[in-house]
């Protein structure tokens, strides 16, 4: 797990998160026969960077890898999408299924909504680039694999893109490497994701810093939150609201994939810097519990201290500093030795063996 992706490569050289004004015709020249060992960015979708999500598509010939990278939240439009935490019913990606799954409204619409002048959705646009790269050489569909990555909301978009791409006509498995990602969907989404994992169609490494508040939410949809508030102030209104929607369990968010929790502080001598767990373990074992840990308690306590004014001046910034790219870079560097001999396939085998 420590090999393959350098942290700079994970963010496409670190430049994608800084793009905000749009780059016209931001397309790299076609690769030459001697591509070397570095990644080449072949497409960048950022011309309407203030109104739409930003992505890049790259290829690494030496590692037989095609990568889609999503920018995290930078603009007002990005943050508005983050805030739309209602769960919408979206189609199950499996062609044989007519079921639906619940997905974060903001992320789903950002990736799949139609665009002005009849342009395809961002998902369709990116898939055109990905399919073209796979079709450029007859050997690529046998030798290359698709990787999808992003930080913050970019990680959520990567998870969602990989979820649907795993059911498309692409070489499998699709590998998602999300960093600092919030939750993306409900229980039906998590169960379907786990089934796709069991079929070898998708793998997901979800990297989360200890105490990063972004990775701890959202917990419930806006409907669920409204229901709780209405119940407290108007029991009759609560019953009316409940009658118009499905069970509240459909409005709860769940994480997916293999969680890699990284620590930079509060580590005892000899204690690991990295903890690995399988997010769907409780779902598959029938417990149906939300994948929470002591992070939630720690962050909530810090928020209470902040709101009560007990934080020294400037320390409230520590609440979000765990989310920054620099913090993740530091965490990855500290955990590198622990990860050197691990592979994602072996971690999946170990964490799912007893399920």
Image (cartoon, helix red, strand yellow):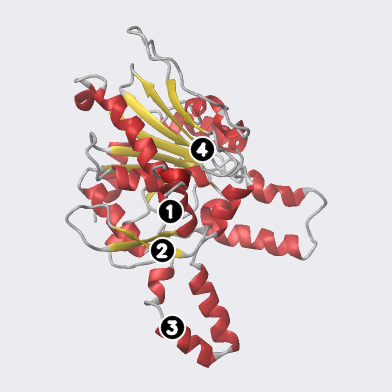
Say the numbered circle drawn on residue 242: 3
Task: Point out the tag, 2 or 3, that comes first from the N-terminus.
Answer: 2
Q: Residues within 10 Å of mark 2 (few under 14, many from 20)?
A: some
Which disc is residue 234 wearing?
none
* Residue 328 image offset from top left, x and y in percent: 56, 37
Give the mark, 3 or 4, whose residue is nearer the N terminus.
4
Residue 243 drawn above or below residue 172: below
For label 1, the crowd category at 10 Å Cα-Cα, with few meaning under 14, some 14 to 19 and many 20 or more, is many
Residue 54, numbered label: 4
Q: Is residue 75 left or right of residue 11?
A: right
Q: Nearer the viewer, mark 3 or mark 4?
A: 4
Contact flag, marks 2 and 1 (Cβ < 8 Å): yes
Tell me the residue that label 2 is attached to. 88
Between marks 4 and 2, how big is the CA–CA gap? 22 Å
Marks 3 and 1: CB-CB under 8 Å?
A: no
Q: Position of residue 236 (x, y in %)?
A: 51, 92
CB under 8 Å between discs 2 and 3:
no
At horizontal 43% and vertical 37% (from top left) the residue drawn is 149
Which mark is first along the chain, 1 or 2? 2
Q: Nearer the viewer, mark 2 or mark 3?
A: 2
Where residue 60 appears, x then y in whole percent? 37, 20
Residue 211 relative to residue 139: left or right: right
Give the labeled residue for mark 1.
108
């Amino acid at each position: 797990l420590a090999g393959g992706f350098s942290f700079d490569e994970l963010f496409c050289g670190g430049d994608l998160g800084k793009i905000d004004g749009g780059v016209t015709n931001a397309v790299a020249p076609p690769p030459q026969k001697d591509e070397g060992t570095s990644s080449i960015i072949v497409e960048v979708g950022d011309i309407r960077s203030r109104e739409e999500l930003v992505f890049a598509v790259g290829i690494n010939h030496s590692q037989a890898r095609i990568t889609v990278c999503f920018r995290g939240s930078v603009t007002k439009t990005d943050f508005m999408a983050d805030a739309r935490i209602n769960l919408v019913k979206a189609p199950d990606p499996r062609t044989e299924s007519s079921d639906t799954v619940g997905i974060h409204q903001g992320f789903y619409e950002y990736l799949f909504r139609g665009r002005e002048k009849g342009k395809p959705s961002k998902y369709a646009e990116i898939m055109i680039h990905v399919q073209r790269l796979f079709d450029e050489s007859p050997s690529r569909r046998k030798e290359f694999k698709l990787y999808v990555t992003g930080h913050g909301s970019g990680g959520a978009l990567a998870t969602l893109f990989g979820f649907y791409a795993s059911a498309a006509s692409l070489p499998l498995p699709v590998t998602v490497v999300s960093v600092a990602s919030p939750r993306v969907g409900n229980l039906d989404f998590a169960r379907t994701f786990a089934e796709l994992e069991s079929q070898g169609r998708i793998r997901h490494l979800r990297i989360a810093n200890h105490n990063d508040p972004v990775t701890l939410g959202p917990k419930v949809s806006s409907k669920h939150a409204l229901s709780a508030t209405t119940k407290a102030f108007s029991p009759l209104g609560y019953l009316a609201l409940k009658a118009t929607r499905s069970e509240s369990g459909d409005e709860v968010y769940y994480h997916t994939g293999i969680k890699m929790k990284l620590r930079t502080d509060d580590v005892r001598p000899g204690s690991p810097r990295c903890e690995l767990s399988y997010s769907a373990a409780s779902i598959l074992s029938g417990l149906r519990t939300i994948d929470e840990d002591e992070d939630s308690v720690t962050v909530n306590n810090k928020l209470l201290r902040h709101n009560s004014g007990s934080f020294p001046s400037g320390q409230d910034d520590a609440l979000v500093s765990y989310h920054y790219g620099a913090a993740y870079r530091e965490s990855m560097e500290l955990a590198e030795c622990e990860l050197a001999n691990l592979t994602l396939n072996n971690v999946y085998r170990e964490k799912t063996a007893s399920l």
